[in-house]
Image: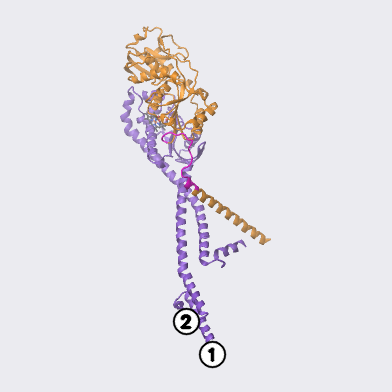
Chain colours: A purple, B orange
Amino acid sequence: MKITGLKMFLGGDGSRPLRKQLSLTLAVVFTGSILVVILLLDQLFGWQAKDLINQRSVFFMDTMLAVRQYTSKQVNPVIAPLNEGGGAFRPEAVPSYSATTVFEYLRGSKPEYKEYSYREATLNPTNLKDKSDTFESEVIASFRSSPAQKVITGERNTPLGSYHFVARPIKVTSQSCLVCHSTPDRAPRSQILAYGDSNGFGWKIDEIVGAQIVSVPQNTVFRAKRESLLATVLLLAAVFSAVALVANSILNRLILQPMRLISKKAEEASVTPSTVSFTEKNRADEIGQLAKSFERMKQSLAISMQMLKDRQKP
Amino acid sequence: MAWLGFVNGQHKGITTWLALMGKACLLMLSLLLASCSGTLNTGKALCGPNGALRVGLIDPREGLDASSQQPFANQDIENFQTMLAQASQCEVRLEPLRSTDRARERLADQEWDVAFLPPGLTAFALQQSAGYSPLRVLSVNQTSRASILVLASSRFQRLADLNGARIGLLRRGSLTGFYLPLYNLHGLSLNQVTFALNYTALLNMLKDGKVDAIAWDNSQAPASVPVRSLTTDTHKIPMGALVLSGALAKANYLPFLKSLDDSSGQMPAWLGYAATILPNQQELQPLKAIVESVESWEMPLDKQPHRVFGRKVGV
């Protein structure tokens, strides 16, 4: 019942003019397809947005690694002698400090980076601000238990909402790290004065001591997805409207205009068939066929009328 | 029967189809709404200039050695951070510090938006150049008195005898271990200044003869070796405070403060957060003058000679 109703509605049951029927049919079909497209793209763009954020996060972490390396190799040798003096500790020599500082600048450089945050969460940190919380400790523990694991991504719920994060392990790769992170008496005295001697020590070579963690609010993922989706939908709507307009004018030119003409001539022909000529009969299409049929009908009508007249003559 | 089943199946198909379309319509609606309303939320959030709220937290008991420093227990800090995030509605970067020296730098560079400070650093933060304003009292049981100790057997009798002596201090920014002793040593030329992390380390240095005199806080357990005090500072020591950076003091911080007040019961007890009590700026004034004086002098460097010299405001 319903299905046939829908079919009649879309296919036309002759209850409205063709033009209206076409517009109606197209509107329904197009809206339906836009809705279907939304459903599919919602999934697709969700994956895409997350993928972009993951890629960007990994890129950030690689960059931070490079900054760390630069600091270790080129800045530390210059600054280290300063830290042997009696002045305040210069953290510029610390790879972790330069990485987190550079990231802050990066964050400030573009609005779309502002939502990213970077942490070097560590089980036993030098700076207590880097102390891993319960959740981060679990991530680090899973890196420690399976060293082959290189990246962990996932969602994290906080009182401020849900976050998407990407984490990678931080490994003590070089002996140079142990100057500052093994025992307090090896570390520069100024570092001890600045950070104390009770944490951030006892690290071992090749140990995974923490994790680089980039996190982004889930809202950002949703927003990126929504923006792509909205753009696509608006585009589709525009294209569909154009198609509908064109279809309408084609319908008009191809069918409706000639039909109206023919129907006017047919009306005339019903009164004075001899004066009317269905010129469209030379066309090769269906309109031509219709015109031919009318032409034949007109001729038979003319003959019949002639016969009637002849019989009436006494 | 089979016919009925067919119809049922078809019905089911139609209902799921309708449900899907409904979902799509909702999505469409949310799209339009989101695009109209633009960026939503955060009228009430209190955030720092770079997005996150940077919070400094200083151990209120200066100069204790690490073994007796319970405050920064993991869970305490984590809960505290969560509480701050809920109060500010902003991502919180909590930096717990034992080093008054680093805290001093942080405050001077305005790298904290909010900070929980002991009295000396509160005075430092309230200086014009740092530009913080005090919001709440941190009332820690305060029995501190700064004095300067020498060994009982020492040849030094009066403060003035310390000219040319080697002296041990706590790190820059400490009240009883740095500001007050230096203030009292004004005018002397010291042969060497050595910094230590805590009073136990200072006492050991004194005992081992590495320094001639040390800064001391009388609220510490009595020294384990026979010592003598050359001078005891008589300035009244006010309470520490929760302070807010100049930039944030212009924002609407009242909801944040109210939320902190409401949840003060869950704050770590050692913090001494006193809900609804505004710090008395008058009481802080003398300490501020002392800190300002000492800060305007040249800073002593570790293991270097130092002349305690500069304009001294008498209070």
Q: Which residue lies at the image location 36% right of the left edge and 9% below the top edge?
A: B159
Q: Residues within 10 Å of mark 2 (few under 14, many from 20)?
A: few
Q: Looking at the rendered structure, which numbered label has been put on residue B79?
A: none
Image coordinates of residue A231 in percent, x first then y, are 45, 51
Looking at this view, is A167 or A149 the one in front?
A167
Instruction: Decide: is A163 above or below A227.
Output: above
Identify the main secondary structure in magenta. loop
Q: Which residue lies at the image location 47% right of the left edge and 56% below the top edge?
A: A237
Image coordinates of residue A57 in percent, x first then y, are 42, 41
Specify the amino acid type for callout 1: Asp
Chain letter for the residue marked with disc 2 in the picture = A
Question: Can you tell which quarter of the image residue B312 is in?
Answer: top left
Which contiguous range is marked in magenta?
B33-50
Specify the amino acid type for callout 2: Thr
Question: Can you tell which quarter of the image residue B129 is in?
Answer: top left
Instruction: Report which residue position mark 2 lands on.
Output: A275
Q: Looking at the rendered structure, which numbered label has been put on residue A310?
A: 1
Residue B44 in the magenta stretch? The answer is yes
Q: Mark 2 or mark 1: name the one nearer the start of the chain.
A: 2
Looking at this view, is A195 or B41 the one in front?
B41
Residue ranking furthest to the front? A314
Residue B85 in the magenta stretch? The answer is no
Instruction: Decide: is A312 above or below B120.
Output: below
Instruction: Decide: is A17 above or below B288.
Output: below
Q: Which residue lies at the image location 45% right of the left edge and 67% below the top edge?
A: A250
- Whether residue B81 is visible, yes or no, is no
Q: Is residue B21 left or right of residue B207?
A: right
Instruction: Decide: is A73 above or below A15.
Output: above
Q: Are marks 2 and 1 in contact (CB under 8 Å)?
A: no
Q: Residues within 10 Å of mark 1 (few under 14, many from 20)?
A: few
